[in-house]
Image: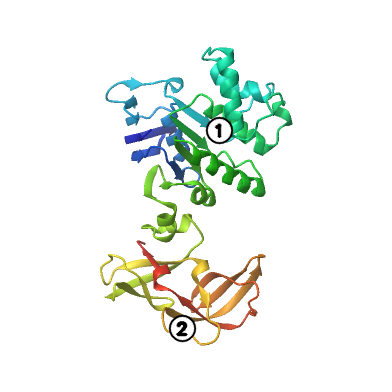
Amino acid sequence: MEIRIRGVSKFYYSDGKTIKALDDVNLTIPSNKIFTLLGPSGSGKTTLLRCIVGLETPDVGEISIGDEVVWSKDKGISVPPEKRGLGMVFQTYAIWPHMNVFDNVAYPLQVRNLPKDEIRLRVAETLRFVQMEGFERRPATKLSGGQQQRVALARALVAAPKVILFDEPLSNLDAKLREETRKELRAFLGKLEITAVYVTHDRVEALALSDSIAVMRAGQIVEIGTPQKIYFDADHRFVADFIGRANLVKATVRAEEGGNTVVDSGLGRIVCQHRDIPVGSEATLCIRPEFIRIVKGEAPAAGNLVNGRIESLVFVGEAYEVEIGVGDEHLLARIDPDAKLIEGDSVSFTLAPEHCLLVAI
């Protein structure tokens, strides 16, 4: 079920000031995909999600779910949340502690006065799908965090919604359980023909779960793309920096050569992947730490070769996180844990042009 958001704005008023939580948002969320709204706190992602659900009322614009307009300022349409055909999983799960697993999941069907036999069948099917079969009579207070998350998902799915929405549902889990549950959630959603809208500030969650990501800032959509496009080929400095750790270096475009863009920077002259930026323009050179390759032995013929000095090393298990000084620039790199380097060593490293990304300042 496709979701279309046209010209939606939402204002809050505090101490005589007007705060734009959403600023003329235009967005199409495709059917049967996992679409993530990613951004820092205060970017408007949760407000947008709540407007789709109907828990918040926009001030301007129109929202459609499938062929139905569910909210429109100009047309005077406002469909209540319970009639929008949506399921939602909240950050706190909203599992009722006085109910067992069966009653928690059955509740959306019970309020619709469905026959008891149909309720039992649909609850059993849904619990089997989320791998909670046999937990029907388990009190909610006896469940782990991961199990509560599955129950919340089952409750959202049991009524066969057109769209399911998630408001940072994994943020209360510890790191290891969050990783495991993230994989399960991706597998569950991949089996369903359903549109999923997922809100998070966690870039790893967004990259691991999503078919498409919309990065938000200050109530606006900054950029939309696949996880690979957003991570490797962002168009904006904010997006490149927010989606993952990045070394950002000021640069000036000097030439176009052999399908690449050449810049002068604090690292020297660097050949980058092509960007349509006029010669003489200022830009930002973005280099991910994992693409800095320390030279061992003779330097390769291809790629940018840069000389620097090891400023610090931190062992993090699977790698060393290294700070390399190059003139006035300081670059973060990730290198092999068996690297024979110490602080103060002079090093040479290469930067492949395809991993040197230019973004607007």
In this rendering, position of residue 113 left or right of residue 83: right
Give the colour scheme shown: rainbow
Tell me where residue 248 appears, x and y as whole percent: 45, 66
Q: Label 1, on which residue? A: 90
Tell me where residue 310 appears, x and y as whole percent: 59, 78
Instruction: Please determine whether, in this image, residue 130 is positioned above or below residue 106.
Output: below
Q: Nearer the viewer, residue 272 or 210?
A: 210
Please state, as top left, top right, bottom left or bottom right, where the C terminus lies in the image: bottom left
In this rendering, position of residue 345 left or right of residue 278: right
Q: Label 2, on which residue? A: 300
Q: Is residue 16 visible?
A: no
Is disc 1 surrounded by few (<14), some (14 to 19) or many (20+) residues within 10 Å?
some
As drawn, which residue projects farthest toward the left? 278
Q: Earlier in the sequence, mark 1 or mark 2?
A: 1
Residue at the (52%, 37%) spot, across then down = 167
Residue at the (65%, 80%) spot, across then down = 340
Residue at the (57%, 72%) spot, across then down = 323
